[in-house]
């Protein structure tokens, strides 16, 4: 990065007989402070006081100096913009033949790569379109169009949202880091790109993989594992009753994202993928609670689903079936290889303490700063502070255990957030966020529950913005579409009513306590909510993109007000939820 020196410009101008450095310092301060008065008016004003060493009669000299200073002004602006970007690190790209290193820069917590560097790494030709501020990466069979200042890019015929808009830094166009694997995917095929965002390394595999995603979800009665492929596969599930289940996939090539997992959810201990020649195996190591397993295939996208059932679930299913169908004096029927419906509410005594655990999820974190306000405050910092405040308040006033998906500035993948809630058997899940809009006039609070389709255009935009973190997780564009279908295999729709009610109570309290616009309860396909086996909502507490709301969010008192509003909503929902469940008939003697 080229160093910027204001004093060097001043010395150069003094040697050429130009005005005193005091004027340049004045202009520099005005630039930094946002003053954009006419240069000629500044010159004339200073000349009257004799500070420029020129007379009022020399108007031509004033114009000459104004022209010179205008050039200096432009140099200063370029220098300030360049100076605001700091070197963030190196990104290694290993190609079919050779490798190269790209240098990234950081601006306001966001990391960028030069667009020219991305073009070089992906073997694309870079050109500027006739339309201003638009650039095209041209590949043999497709292209990517990038627009300066817009987070939406066009990949072939598909519109894709990036986590941040491309921007100009000095004379170069810089793009968010996640454009690199997208461009490599267009050049070599997405199935050959291995992008590790943590290690900051991209590799092009020798041959494409045919198995690209492995997802795990824990439910009260079973654990579901979904293996997604790029095509159909023949497979065989082996379960010898020893606690180890093996899924054999014929001619399946494991992708780089399919790795070993330590699950430890009480039923499944670990998952270990292995590539054995042309075939692949997935080893499931279970506990003594494993009762049975089954596997089946689904299409669009192609995937293999493995369900592992617990003894407790099978016993419950058997007892219910026997009570309904078995006549007196007959033997009980054989256990079917089916589970009870996920999400079935338990029968409770009116005196049972229903809500015992709540999971609070401060959005974003680590390398994902979330939305950034006009003055530079970051969504991830504000929601973490509110989340920790809410945790203390809930534990002190309600005596309920609170689990945080993150208690510090760390990156947590979207899917892991609800997995944490499922592992702890939480009673409900609240994901905390701040909203952002292209127009700074937008204000107010919104709450969301899960739905397959967004309820309106605003809900769609919010879901797109929150889901762009998948780019940072190294999940490709086609994989994201497949992931959506895969996670819907695991989605819990039983709790829609409760989730909608929780969202409404939280929004009502936010509106009353904060006295802000009531933007309504909405629904959208937020990845962070898919798969939660409990009532779950996403809260957009305020618009960080609005200068007034951003200023309020910097105040501890305002954050405490948001916390109190959320606390009031949680308290009301807890009371209603427990009352509703307590009215169910109690369990009979076993």
Image (spheres, rainbow, N blue to C red):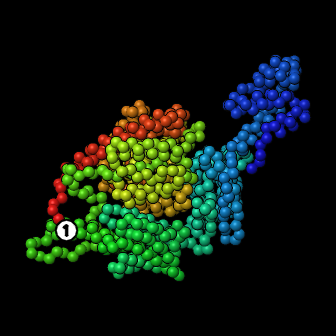
Question: Along the horizontal axis of the image, is 417 left or right of 332?
Answer: right
Residue drawn at x 21%, y 50% as measured from the top left: 351
Q: Position of residue 108 (x, y in %)?
A: 62, 45
Residue drawn at x 27%, y 65% as measured from the top left: 340
Residue drawn at x 59%, y 66% as measured from the top left: 193
Q: Nearer the viewer, residue 351 or 110?
A: 351
The image quarter containing residue 115 is bottom right
Question: Along the horizontal axis of the image, is 309 left or right of 68?
Answer: left
Above or below — where is 503 with respect to 15?
A: below
Q: Position of residue 18 (x, y in %)?
A: 87, 30
Element type where label 1 sits in the image: helix
Question: Along the horizontal axis of the image, is 343 left or right of 69?
Answer: left
The extreme left residue here reads 328
Q: Nearer the viewer, residue 158 or 31?
A: 31
Q: Nearer the viewer, residue 176 or 362?
A: 362
Look at the image and tell me whether residue 275 can be seen. yes
Question: Along the horizontal axis of the image, is 426 left or right of 560?
Answer: left
The image quarter containing residue 183 is bottom right
Residue drawn at x 32%, y 62% as measured from the top left: 220
The residue pinned by badge 1 equals 319
Above or below — where is 142 with respect to 165?
A: below
> For the C terminus, which image quadrant?
bottom left
Above or below — where is 256 with respect to 49?
A: below
Look at the image and tell me whether residue 461 can be seen. no
Q: Position of residue 102 (x, y in %)?
A: 69, 58
Above or below — where is 455 with respect to 342?
A: above
Mark 1, residues whose alpha carbon is within 10 Å: few (<14), some, or many (≥20)?
Answer: some
* Tally of numbered discs: 1
């Amino acid at each position: 990065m080229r160093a910027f020196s204001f004093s060097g410009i001043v010395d150069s101008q003094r040697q050429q007989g130009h005005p005193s450095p005091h004027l340049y310092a004045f202009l520099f301060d005005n630039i930094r402070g946002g003053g954009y008065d006419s240069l000629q008016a500044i010159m004339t004003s200073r000349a009257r006081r004799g500070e420029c060493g020129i007379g009022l009669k020399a108007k031509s000299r004033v114009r000459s100096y104004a022209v010179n200073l205008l050039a200096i002004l432009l140099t200063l602006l370029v220098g300030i913009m360049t100076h605001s970007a700091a070197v963030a690190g190196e990104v290694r790209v290993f190609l079919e033949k050779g490798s190269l290193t790209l240098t990234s820069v950081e601006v306001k917590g966001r990391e960028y790569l030069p667009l020219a560097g991305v073009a070089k790494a992906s073997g694309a030709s870079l050109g500027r379109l006739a339309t201003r501020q638009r650039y095209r990466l041209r590949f043999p069979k497709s292209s990517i169009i990038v627009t300066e200042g817009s987070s939406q890019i066009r990949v072939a015929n598909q519109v894709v949202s990036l986590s941040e808009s491309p921007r100009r830094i000095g004379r170069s166009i810089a793009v968010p880091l996640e454009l690199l694997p997208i461009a490599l995917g267009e050049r070599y095929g997405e199935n050959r790109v291995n992008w590790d965002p943590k290690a900051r390394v991209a590799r092009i595999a020798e041959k494409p993989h045919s198995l690209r995603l492995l997802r795990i979800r824990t439910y009260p009665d079973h654990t579901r594992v979904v293996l997604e492929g790029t095509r159909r596969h023949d497979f065989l599930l082996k379960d010898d009753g020893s606690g180890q289940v093996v899924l054999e996939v014929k001619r399946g090539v494991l992708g780089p994202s399919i790795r070993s997992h330590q699950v430890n959810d009480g039923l499944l201990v670990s998952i270990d993928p292995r590539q054995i020649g042309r075939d692949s195996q997935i080893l499931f190591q279970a506990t003594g609670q494993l009762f049975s397993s089954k596997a089946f295939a689904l299409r669009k996208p192609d995937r293999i689903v493995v369900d592992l059932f617990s003894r407790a679930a099978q016993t419950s299913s058997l007892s219910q079936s026997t009570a309904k169908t078995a006549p007196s004096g007959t033997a009980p029927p054989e256990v079917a290889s089916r589970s009870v419906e996920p999400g079935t509410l338990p029968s409770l005594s009116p005196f049972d303490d229903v809500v015992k655990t709540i999971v609070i999820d401060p959005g974003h974190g680590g390398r994902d700063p979330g939305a950034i306000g006009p003055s530079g405050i970051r969504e991830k910092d504000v929601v973490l502070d509110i989340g920790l405040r809410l945790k203390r308040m809930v534990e002190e006033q309600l005596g309920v255990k609170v689990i945080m998906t993150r208690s510090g500035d760390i990156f947590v993948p979207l899917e892991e957030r609800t997995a944490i809630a499922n592992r702890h058997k939480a009673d409900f899940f609240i994901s905390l966020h701040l909203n952002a809009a292209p127009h700074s006039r937008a204000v107010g609070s919104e709450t969301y529950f899960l739905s397959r389709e967004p309820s309106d255009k605003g809900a769609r935009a919010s879901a797109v913005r929150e889901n762009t973190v998948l780019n940072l997780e190294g999940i490709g564009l086609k994989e994201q579409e497949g992931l959506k279908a895969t996670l819907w295999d695991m989605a819990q729709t039983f709790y829609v009513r409760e989730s909608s009610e929780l969202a409404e109570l939280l929004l009502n309290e936010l509106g009353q306590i904060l006295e802000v616009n009531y933007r309504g309860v909405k629904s959208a396909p937020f990845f962070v909510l898919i798969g939660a086996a409990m009532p779950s909502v996403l809260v957009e507490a305020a618009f960080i993109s609005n200068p007034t709301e951003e200023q309020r969010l910097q105040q501890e008192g305002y954050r405490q007000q948001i916390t109190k509003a959320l606390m009031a909503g949680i308290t009301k929902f807890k009371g209603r939820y427990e009352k509703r469940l307590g009215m169910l008939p109690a369990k009979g003697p076993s």
